[in-house]
Image (cartoon, helix red, strand yellow):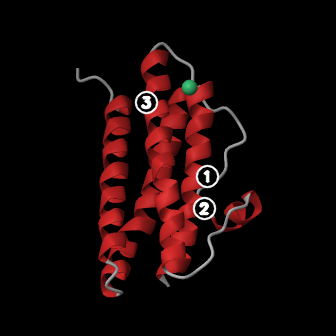
């Protein structure tokens, strides 16, 4: 059901947002300014999607989950309590982006089938957003050509 998937998307986005903020604060390395800035933009952009997801759940006539307990139950994003090295943070974010896209892409078809075109548009925007973030990380992690 679209509203159930939106609840999972909301919880996962909250988890993703918290983890991006964690990495923004704690990342280290010789390219620290760019890394710190990358995660700043990432959590800002992801955070900017949370309210719209929540309001779509309400528009569909359901109550929106709004507690850490419910988010932990619903999220498909693994929590991170440690401080990984920078390259591992980026790898982990790339994995998390893949998980988000695996959720978002089939939801587009579900929204279209239910004639929720506004939600489908929003999901298409999310696919673009996460796709672009993944491109940046792949480019950061790419070894220099010989
Ligand atoms: Fe900051």
- Disc 3: CA contacts within 10 A as few (<14), some (14-19) or many (>=20): some
Q: Mark 3 vs mark 2: which is more N-terminal?
A: 2
Ligand 1's quadrant is top right
Q: Marks 1 and 2: CB-CB under 8 Å?
A: yes
Percent coordinates x, y for residue 110 in the rendering: 37, 81
Instruction: Tell which residue pokes out farthest to the top in this image.
Output: 30
Q: Can residue 71 be seen in this view?
A: yes
Q: Residue 124 carries which label?
A: none
Q: Earlier in the sequence, mark 3 or mark 1?
A: 1
- Report the Cα–Cα distance between label 1 and label 2: 6 Å
Q: From the Cβ of disc 3, is ligand 1 less than 8 Å away?
A: no
Cα separation between marks 3 and 1: 18 Å
User: Does the residue tagged 2 have its C-beta within 8 Å of any atom of ligand 1?
Assistant: no
Task: Identify the residue under disc 2.
Answer: 11
Q: What element carries label 3?
A: helix
Position of 45 relative to 127 (above/below): above
Callout 1: helix, strand or loop? helix
Q: Position of residue 140 (x, y in %)?
A: 36, 30
Quarter holding residue 107: bottom left
Residue at 49 percent of width and 17 percent of height = 32
Q: Is residue 78 placed above or below 121 in the rendered structure? A: above
Tell me the quarter of the image containing the C terminus.
top left
Q: Residue 15 carries which label?
A: 1
Quarter of the rendering containing residue 63: bottom right
Q: How crowded is mark 2: few (under 14 residues within 10 Å), some or many (20 or more)?
A: many
Which residue carries the number 3 mark? 38
Q: Which sits in the foreground, 115 or 58?
A: 58
* Label 1 neighbour load within 10 Å: few <14, some 14-19, many 20+: many
**Distance Cα–Cα, label 3 vs label 2:** 22 Å
């Amino acid at each position: 059901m679209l509203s159930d998937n939106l609840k999972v998307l909301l919880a996962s986005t909250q988890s993703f947002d918290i983890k991006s903020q964690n990495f923004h604060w704690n990342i280290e390395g010789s390219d620290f300014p760019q890394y710190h800035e990358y995660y700043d933009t990432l959590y800002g952009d992801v955070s900017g999607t949370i309210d719209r997801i929540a309001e779509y759940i309400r528009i569909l006539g359901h109550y929106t989950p709004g507690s850490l307990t419910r988010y932990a139950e619903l999220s498909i994003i693994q929590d991170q309590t440690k401080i990984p090295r920078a390259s591992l943070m980026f790898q982990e974010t790339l994995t998390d982006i893949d998980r988000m896209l695996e959720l978002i892409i089939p939801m587009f078809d579900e929204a279209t089938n239910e004639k929720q075109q506004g939600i489908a548009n929003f999901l298409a925007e999310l696919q673009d957003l996460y796709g672009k973030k993944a491109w940046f990380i792949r480019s950061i992690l790419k070894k220099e050509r010989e």
